[in-house]
Image (cartoon, grey):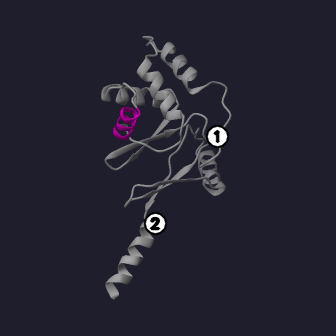
Amino acid sequence: MLPAVEVSQSPEDKFREYLASRPRARRFTGPQRDMVRYIFQKHNHFDADNLFDEMKAAGLDVSRATVYRTLNKLVDAGLLRSIDIGPRKYYEHDYGYPQHEHLYCVNCHKMIEFQHPAVEAVVRDVSQQHNFVVQGHSFIIRGTCADCNRAKMTKRRLDLV
């Protein structure tokens, strides 16, 4: 896991401020508060259905519709980042977390976060060449993780016996 970045507001306060600043101000509901607290108490990649199931299992009262609507608002507010991978959309912390990239295992769906100065240098250099102002980027490398590769190799060896 990458180190957190210092922020001036709690995720709850930032989301409350976002809702109040909308043209049609929205109130910060109890289920939304529970969602923000639940999401930011741990760091993991999740999809909407996983989040809904986990929150229900934790005894939190939230509807599936509230989860989907609130996730979109949290992305708009800059608190979460959405990552589209094929038919699934994953979410992760954006607020209070450094820019990073991902390795995505197509077998087990594991996401591995990494930072590398060369990636940042390429983004910076290409952007400067084109006089382009970067607002963010997403770099996902798809492949097979070490665990899945190990399992595949063990299975192949057993086939030779």
Mark 1 Cα shell of 10 Å, populated few (<14), some (14-19), many (≥20)? few
Q: Is residue 35 magenta?
A: no
Residue placed at 48% from the left, 32% from the top? 38
- The dot on residue 147 is 2
Residue placed at 50% from the left, 13% from the top? 20
Residue placed at 42% from the left, 67% from the top? 148
2 vs 1, front mark: 2
Residue 37 in the image, given as x and y percentages of width and height: 51, 28
32 with respect to 115 (left or right): left
Farthest-out residue, bottom: 161
In the depicted view, which residue is nearer to us: 148 or 123? 148
Task: Check the image and report above or below for 53 versus 121.
Answer: above
Q: Secondary structure at mark 2?
A: helix
Quote the CA–CA distance across marks 2 and 1.
27 Å
Secondary structure that dominates the magenta span? helix
Residue 119 in the image, given as x and y percentages of width and height: 60, 54
Q: Is residue 52 magenta?
A: yes
73 with respect to 79 (left or right): left
Residue 51 in the image, given as x and y percentages of width and height: 39, 37
In the depicted view, which residue is nearer to us: 27 or 161? 161
Residue 50 quadrant: top left
Q: Quadrant of the C terminus?
A: bottom left
156 with respect to 38 (left or right): left
Mark 2 Cα shell of 10 Å, populated few (<14), some (14-19), many (≥20)? few
Give, as a single range, the part of the protein colored magenta: 49-58
Q: Secondary structure at mark 1?
A: loop
| Callout 2 amino acid | Asp
Residue 2 in the image, given as x and y percentages of width and height: 62, 48
Residue 149 quadrant: bottom left
Which numbered disc flags the more N-terminal residue, 2 or 1?
1
| Callout 1 amino acid | Ala
Q: Which residue is mark 1?
A: 4
